[in-house]
Image (tube, helix red, strand yellow):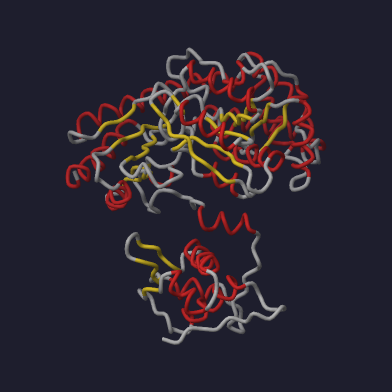
Amino acid sequence: MSWFSIDRSARSAAIHSQIHEDLLGLIANGALPPGTRLPSSRALAETLGVSRNAVVDAYDTLTARGVLEARPKSGTYVKDSAREIVSDGRDNSGYYHQPELSAPARLLLSTGTRRPIWPDVPAAKYNFGPLIPPMDELSIERFRSCVNSVLVNDAEQALGYDESEGYAPFRRWVASYMNARGVECSEENILIVAGYQQGLALVARALLDPADTALVEDPTFPDTPNALRLYGATVQGIPLGETGPDVGVLTEVVSSRRPKLICVTPLWQNPTGIVMSRGIRKALLALAEQYGFIIVEDGFTDEFCYSGRLIPPLSAEDRCCRVVYVGSMSKLLFGGLRLGWVVASKALVRVLTLIKQASMLCHSPLLQAACHQFCELGYLENHIVRVRKILSVRRDAMVRAMEEYFPDGVTWRAAEGGLSTWVTLPRGVDSDQVAAECAKGGAIVAPGRPFSLYGRATNNLRMSYSLCHEDTIREGVKVVGDVLKRMT
């Protein structure tokens, strides 16, 4: 077919944008029907007389939008749903309007992992996908009473604006809570945020310049590298061993790349459930002190240790202000609460507050005041004790079912805390295909590939037990086990 030409005049759009727009036009008018295999980026670049990077940018953007599909060892194809997606993005005149994206946004589009990371099954009977704490009816009623109490007794303040740092009594409670866990701090060290993701985004905005290096555990929570890429960082993964990040690899990367920060989850790491050993904790803190980088500690399920014998956060051992701790009520209490906190030096908290103000003046004073009352009345402590028992029972139910229904060669890590189990399949068994087959039977599992920075973990599954009752867990694991028996 005849391809388009490139306008190189000074007033024309960027070349990659022109390629993007022209490909959309060819798809919209039927010249490139669904299933069409596109030329390689190198071949199209030669045909158009442009750099290969411009074609790669256009292909990556269209792939991220679901218009194109990259098939390993096969090429790039127009997806079946491409024309529908293209038509949805056009105005009445038939022209598609795509703003000129920043370099970090283009990088995020081409390398980021979109959520959800498990198949979309609206009527899933066995939902082992999301990491959401169990909905405890007693805590729901107690939280409702706290909201009502705040509205009755202090509605004017609760429904108005508040300090950007957060509701002062709540910040004081958080400081007391963190001190009890071994982290020395005051309310001036606390910033209220909308959970881990906003806390990480604020730290990244404060510390990262374009092309700086940031490190993450590999595998890791997919939104962590996405947040770092958004600020132009080069993200590198550190492989995980049985007790935490590989110290040898970490030392080599730190000495050669001089990263600005590293993101870690020392307790019940997501997705593997690994607990960082004391030796690795000491080595990580020593490297941070030596090379001056910041450690962002995700404490999202620290409290969910089934034995009740809590392990102190990494920040409790920090003597050089190198650790920034991020906690979240969204994992401790209710997933939709969207309240968390950052613990950092007073100087860094001041900077983070200014950055937060640029996009969000304050969080809901009503939710913060209700959450503070819930915690002060001892309801949170009581809630955590009950949820630990619930999770422990559900974890045991999942392990028993795996022992009964999973075939030989499939192994798993039954962590002593957290919300999920990390399953390892025999080599050569693709967890994406397993997840797709499980979804047909109504069981949602999270395939391992999206958790890996380099597309590894292809033979792993993350199975969360937090949302399912024991009998449902057994039935759902049987569905997964039947799939595994057919595919292994």
Instruction: Tell me residue 345's x, y (percent).
Output: 73, 25
Instruction: Tell me residue 59's x, y (percent).
Output: 49, 67
Q: Residue at the location (24% across, 35% down)?
A: 410
Determine whether 62 is above or below 477 in the image: below
Determine whether 41 is above or below 151 in the image: below
Does residue 169 show up? no
Instruction: Tell me residue 140's x, y (percent).
Output: 56, 32
In the displayed orientation, state which residue is furthest to the front.
Answer: 256
Residue in front for this viewpoint, 384 or 460: 460
> Which image quadrant is residue 57 in?
bottom right
437 lies left or right of 244: left
Which quarter of the figure is the C terminus placed in? top left
> Which image quadrant is residue 381 in?
top right
Q: Residue at the location (32% across, 65% down)?
A: 74
Please state the total of marks drawn on the protein image. Answer: 0
> Which image quadrant is residue 452 in?
top left
180 lies left or right of 3: right
Q: Residue at the location (36% across, 66% down)?
A: 75
Determine whether 311 is above or below 488 in the image: above
Q: Residue at the location (55% across, 16% down)?
A: 312
Does residue 465 show up? yes
Residue in front for this viewpoint, 105 or 214: 214
Residue in front for this viewpoint, 228 or 122: 228
Instruction: Tell me residue 109's x, y (percent).
Output: 54, 58
Residue in front for this viewpoint, 319 or 139: 319
In the displayed orientation, state which residue is furthest to the bottom.
Answer: 2
286 lies left or right of 40: right
Which quarter of the figure is the N terminus placed in? bottom left
